[in-house]
Image (spheres, grey):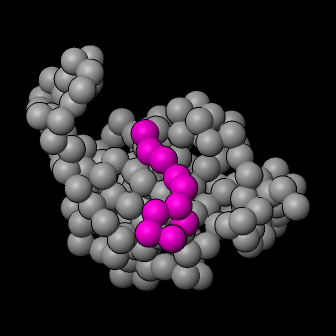
Amino acid sequence: MANSMTEIPVDTFNTRVFNLWHKKWLALASGDFLLGDYNAMTVAWGSMGIMWNLPFVMAVVRPTRYTFEFINKYETFSLSAFPDEFRRALNIIGTESGRDSDKIKIAGLTPMRLDKIEAPGFMEADLTFQCRRIYWEDLDPAKFLLPSIDDHYEKLDYHRMFFGEILSIQGDAAKYSSH
């Protein structure tokens, strides 16, 4: 992580959350860095807040994604945001499969060990959430209330929601913290 990365207390974390998910995107990494058994993908759908009195993030992963195997197998995951110049890298890890190539290396990202979880983070990130899975649920198309939601599932590969307790937020405090 960049030298400007510091621990940001959850109660001082501040960002434009819709911009973070929808415009900036995040890299979700799951697995075990020390074992070299991990994968990452780009996510642009999710949420964050408080659930069961815990700070959480919720990200969705389709069962067809290689990362799905890792986030189901391992207890922890990270979500990382990057400066704008890494948009191409996020596009690569969001569209290529880790089954077929070392897409993280191709994207020019450097996985690194994090201090609270087994899943890796990335040296190039300017914001990282370290999370422990606390709940998951598969989306049920019978409960979609808007017909347009079905348009996102031509292959019937409905996402699984993963709620992660935020154990740590590290980032550029000047950019992501309000005191």
Q: Quadrant of the C terminus?
A: bottom right
Instruction: Look at 80% across and 57% down and name the residue there.
Output: 177
**Residue in front for this viewpoint, 56 or 62:** 56
Residue 135 percent coordinates (x, y):
31, 66
| Residue 42 visible to the viewer | no
Instruction: Look at 12% across and 29% down and name the residue there.
Output: 155
Q: What stretch is highlighted in magenta?
A: 45-55
Q: Is residue 23 left or right of residue 144?
A: right
Look at the image and say whether residue 50 sits in the magenta stretch: yes
Instruction: Look at 21% across and 44% down and name the residue there.
Output: 139
| Residue 8 visible to the viewer | yes
Residue 78 percent coordinates (x, y):
49, 64
Which quarter of the picture shows residue 167? Answer: bottom right
Which quarter of the picture shows residue 149? Answer: top left
Which quarter of the picture shows residue 46? Answer: top left
**Residue in front for this viewpoint, 19 or 70:** 19
Q: Is residue 40 above or below residue 45?
A: below
Number of numbered markers? 0
Residue 169 percent coordinates (x, y):
65, 67
